[in-house]
Structures are given as structure tokens and as C-alpha cells.
Amino acid sequence: MPQYAVVVYQPAPADPMEISAEYAEALERYPAQVEELGGRGVAGYALQPSTTATAVRGDIITDGPFVEAKEVVAGFFVLEAPDLDVALKIAKLNPVYLDGGGVEVRPLFVPPAE
């Protein structure tokens, strides 16, 4: 089954410990919703707040994220779904929308067969 990366964006600084009760409840329901649509979560990770980031650009190392933004990457997960349409339906159910965020869905690269 094809795999997709789902990158989760939330308003900065995107602290995983500061989510609403409504978001927490929706997050609990999310795995069952993924299965109902024919998908399967492979792995998922929440990131520490963007204020803990260290950016490296060549020889330059700076504290904090490289770019100031209203939204930052808060986490990501890998999803298996029959096709992109199903992956997008699953992504639309992500509770991040409740806190003003969004997601980006990208197919994982599959190297060509030799």
C-alpha cells in the first residue's frame, strides 16, 4: 500500500503540551477514523516547541527556527492508504484544524526498480 508523509503545522511555537481538551478528544478518535477509511498509521512524532529548534545552514548555527513564521512544523506521521484521495480524506480529519493549524500530505519517494 502506498505511504504518505503527513506534516502537521500549528501556530508558533506549537507546544505539544498546550493542546485544548477538544483537540485531545479528537486526537483519541483519530486512529479509529483512519482505520475506517482504509488507512493505517505507520509511525508518528510530535516535536518540541519551535523555540527549542537549532538551525544549521552551512557553517552558521543559530538558536531557534531558521525562519520566523506564524505556523511551524509541530510533528509528522507516516500513513499507509490505498491512494492519495484516501490519504487526503484522512488528513482532513486531523484535529490540528481545531487549534488553527493544517497539514501537508506528500507521497513518500519510492526508488525505481533496478
Image (cartoon, grey):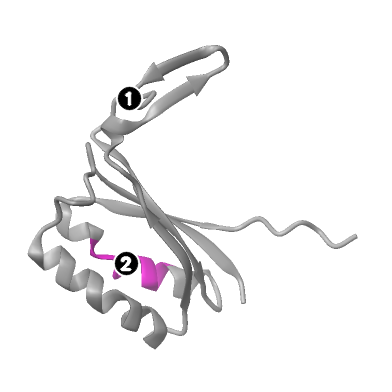
Q: From mark 2 to mark 1, how far is it between C-alphas? A: 29 Å
Q: Give the x, y percent position of residue 66.
A: 39, 23
Question: Majority secondary structure of the magenta segment?
Answer: helix
In the picture shown, does residue 10 fall above or below 106?
above
Label 2 sits on what residue type?
A: Lys
State left or right for residue 107 relative to residue 7. Answer: right
For residue 101, above or below residue 72: below
User: Which mark lies nearer to you, 2 or 1?
Assistant: 1
In magenta, the rendered stretch is 88-95
Label whose residue precedes the other's in the sequence (2 or 1) = 1
Label 2 belongs to which residue? 92
Which label sits on residue 64? 1
Task: Point out residue 42 in the picture as x, y percentages from the top left corner.
Answer: 50, 70
Given the image, on which type of amino acid does mark 1 rest?
Answer: Gly
Q: Position of residue 71 (x, y in %)?
A: 27, 39
Q: Residue 73 in the image: x percent, y percent?
A: 35, 43
